[in-house]
Amino acid sequence: MNLSQTIHGVTFENPTVLASGILGITASSWMRVAAEGGAGAITTKSIWLHEHKGHRNPTVISTDVWTLNAVGVPDAGPEKAKEEIGAYNKKKPVPLIVNIIAESAANYGKTAEAVLPLKPDFLEVNISCPNVEDEFGKPFACSAPDAAAVTKAVKKAAGKVPVFIKLSPQALSIAEIARACADAGADGFTAINTVGPGMAIDLRSRRPILSNRVGGMSGPAIKPIAVRCIADIYAATGGKLPIIGTGGVQSGEDAIELMLAGASLIGIGTAVWKRGIDVFSKVCDEIKEFCAKEGISDVAELVGGMHKTIQRT
Ligand SMILES: Cc1cc2nc3c(=O)[nH]c(=O)nc-3n(C[C@H](O)[C@H](O)[C@H](O)COP(=O)(O)O)c2cc1C
């Protein structure tokens, strides 16, 4: 059973990817996720152009089916990232996807320039933060012209490094945003970021549990939204651009569902906390088990499988 795929010239030994923001930004934790956990690739947390403070604790609350987080995208900036990514690159057991974020299109371009010497295999562009130049501070991911402007700025800075735009399920039409990014030169997509925001209230104190009051939702409850978003992006771009499907994946069967919707690679976030650091190997074993029973010899056969089936019927 072949789990490996080559995407934009980068070989991934298996389709699982550590999702952004889950295990901080230290070379030692990425090495563990690759060596002990079996991940096919690593994504860094979002890197800003300058140091960025996050929210006060508590920032995360979790149940079996959902997690709310309002960490507030804290980051020490590109200098700290250079140390950690530099240390990771000395061994680099699996490909590295560097995730960037900014508050204006121009700063997305500058952040891409700042991280480029770190030789990322792909750049992942988190466009879920609000555009400070927009009158209403609307997230870039919710406006086709803003998402396209960010894509153009990053593409200009990125040279030959493939640029993946990380889309939000909050967009009214994720298909429209994906098309705008594709027209602006995007090389692929990651979908989805967290859903919401949601709120949880402590019954006795009668206060929101998170210090930020609201937080983005992840975990198994968001998987159907991720599947729909991936299917929309795949259809909107004619299946021509690779998608890192992310959202609610816990098991091999979840991963296969996202692949049938159109994902080539599978981001795993919240499930690292639920199933442990070796969730990546477990998901790969479960994919192999399913494929063996179904007579599937290559994982690439699954990508976009739903679209091919419904076209025929
Ligand atoms: C605590 C936490 C921090 C996150 N930080 C980032 C981040 O820095 N950048 C980003 O693009 N996504 C971030 N995400 C979103 C995840 O990468 C992922 O898109 C989302 O959690 C859905 O996947 P999951 O259900 O497998 O967790 C974060 C998620 C969590 C739970």
Image (tube, rainbow, N blue to C red):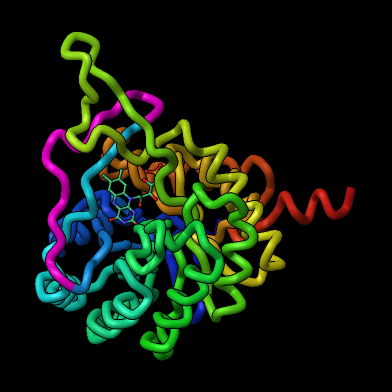
Image point 26% across, 49% down: which residue? 22
Percent x, y for residue 122? Answer: 39, 74
Which of 89/60 is in front? 60
Q: How many marks?
A: 0
* Residue 99 in view, yes or no: no
The verdict on residue 59 being magenta is yes
* Residue 41 in view, yes or no: yes
Q: Quadrant of residue 29?
A: bottom left
Percent x, y for residue 170? Answer: 50, 47
Which of 295/116 is in front? 116
Q: Quadrant of residue 129?
A: bottom left
On screen, residue 23 versus residue 287, left or right, reads left
Image point 42% across, 88% down: which residue? 156
On screen, residue 290 versus residue 138, left or right, reads right
Q: Which residues are magenta?
A: 50-66
Percent x, y for residue 54? Answer: 16, 51
Q: Is residue 249 above or below residue 10?
A: above
Percent x, y for residue 49? Answer: 20, 73
Magenta portion: prevailing SS class? loop
Q: Residue furthest front?
A: 135
The verdict on residue 162 being magenta is no
Quadrant for the N terminus, please. bottom right
Q: Quadrant of residue 19?
A: bottom left
Image point 20% across, 61% down: which residue? 31
Q: Residue furthest right?
A: 313
Image point 50% across, 57% down: which residue? 142
Q: Is residue 90 above or below residue 33?
A: below
Q: Is residue 107 above or below residue 212?
A: below
